[in-house]
Image (cartoon, helix red, strand yellow):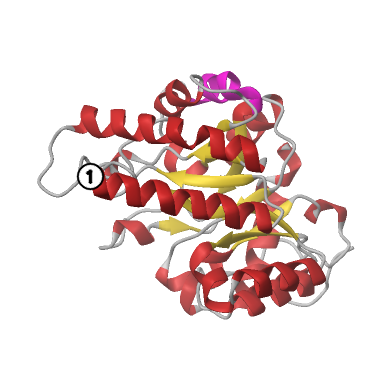
């Protein structure tokens, strides 16, 4: 089922290549809206937007959940009949200071509790960057690995999998010292497959040499598949350099086929950090991502 209404993609302003899938279209069955893609929407608006578009899953961020309260968020999402594909985010545990490490561990335990309450089996872990004044990248990576290990018992008790998200090397200093899928798997493979896995985010791994082989290596450890685009020129704030699928350089067909062949059958989150996307009406953003998803990603699952 498709809409015949004339549409325009955002943020490009170009005419849409295909009609917008309507609610009930089977191609939308695994699509998930990550909340950061519509950052101007509250949790209530994001939930309503998913329902209106026929998207059955949402990737939630802890801050909007905290704004309404966990119990309210749980009811809101459950009443709407949505799945929670992931909770963002845990991690940020590279500090060498004992007090800071203890605080990070406690915050990650709280994140696990929130994921369990939301009925979500995936907590995304962003390892964190180099502590202020620290240039020991190997040491920070080692502390991140230790911190993951310390969370394993609590994650297993709650039935929530820890998803280590490797981040593009441009973020190694300030956000993610684990820069490749290979490095993330080196950490994950020290722990049970049903407790520690990895996040495959096209923005972060598209460039990685041998990435298709690493996706195959990951296999059942893939706990989340997130899609967005690498666009150039990069904006001044590199954090906001994610684009709408099809507006950049990523080979979604190859990466998606690799993820599917590895055995991943979960939801596919669209997660975009981009000022122009955020400035557009949320309903237009959701319509565009639904079209781009069924055109560029879904056929290869």
Question: In front here: 244 or 182?
Answer: 182
Region of the chain picked out in magenta, as a range? 211-220
Q: Main secondary structure of the magenta part?
A: helix
Q: Residue at x 21, y 40 (%)?
A: 96
Question: In front here: 154 or 169?
Answer: 154
Tag count:
1
Q: Position of residue 97 (x, y in %)?
A: 20, 44
The quarter of the rendered structure image containing the N terminus is: bottom right
Helix or strand or loop: what does disc 1 sit on?
loop
Question: In front here: 299 or 194?
Answer: 194
Up/down of 102 relative to 282, above or below:
above
Q: Position of residue 275 (x, y in %)?
A: 41, 71
Q: Residue at x 41, y 34 (%)?
A: 207
The quarter of the rendered structure image containing the C terminus is: top right
Up/down of 10 relative to 137, above or below:
below
Quarter occupied by residue 284: bottom right
Q: Is residue 7 visible?
A: no
Callout 1 crowding tier (Cα within 10 Å): few <14, some 14–19, many ≥20: some
Q: Is residue 258 visible?
A: yes
Q: Residue at x 52, y 54 (%)?
A: 111
Q: Position of residue 209 (x, y in %)?
A: 41, 24
Q: Position of residue 141 (x, y in %)?
A: 30, 31
Q: Residue at x 51, y 20 (%)?
A: 189
Decide if residue 217 is on the left or right side of residue 187: right
Residue ID for mark 1: 173
In the rendered image, residue 218 lying in the magenta stretch gets the answer yes
In the rendered image, residue 250 lying in the magenta stretch gets the answer no
Up/down of 239 relative to 298, above or below:
below
């Amino acid at each position: 089922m498709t809409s015949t209404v004339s549409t325009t993609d955002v943020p490009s302003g170009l005419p849409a290549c295909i009609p917008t899938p309507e609610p009930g279209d089977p191609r939308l069955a695994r699509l998930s809206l990550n909340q950061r893609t519509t950052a101007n929407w509250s949790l209530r608006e994001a939930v309503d937007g998913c329902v209106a578009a026929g998207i059955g899953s949402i990737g939630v961020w802890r801050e909007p959940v905290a704004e309404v309260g966990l119990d309210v968020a749980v009811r809101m999402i459950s009443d709407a009949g949505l799945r929670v594909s992931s909770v963002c985010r845990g991690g940020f545990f590279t500090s060498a200071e004992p007090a800071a490490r203890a605080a990070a561990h406690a915050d990650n335990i709280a994140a696990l509790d929130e994921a369990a309450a939301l009925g979500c089996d995936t907590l995304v872990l962003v390892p964190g960057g180099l502590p202020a004044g620290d240039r020991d990248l190997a040491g920070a990576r080692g502390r991140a690995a230790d911190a993951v290990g310390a969370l394993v018992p609590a994650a297993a008790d709650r039935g929530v999998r820890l998803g280590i998200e490797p981040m593009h090397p441009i973020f190694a200093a300030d956000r993610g010292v684990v820069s490749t899928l290979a490095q993330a798997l080196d950490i994950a493979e020290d722990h049970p497959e049903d407790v520690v896995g990895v996040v495959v985010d096209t923005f972060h791994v598209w460039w990685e040499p041998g990435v298709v082989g690493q996706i195959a290596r990951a296999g059942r450890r893939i706990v989340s598949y997130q899609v967005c685009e690498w666009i150039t020129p990069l904006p001044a704030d590199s954090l906001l350099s994610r684009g709408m699928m099809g507006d950049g350089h990523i080979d979604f067909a190859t990466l998606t086929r690799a993820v599917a062949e590895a055995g991943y059958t979960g939801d596919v989150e669209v997660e975009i950090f981009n000022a122009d996307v955020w400035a557009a009406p949320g309903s237009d953003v959701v319509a565009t991502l639904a079209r781009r998803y069924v055109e560029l990603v879904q056929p290869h699952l």
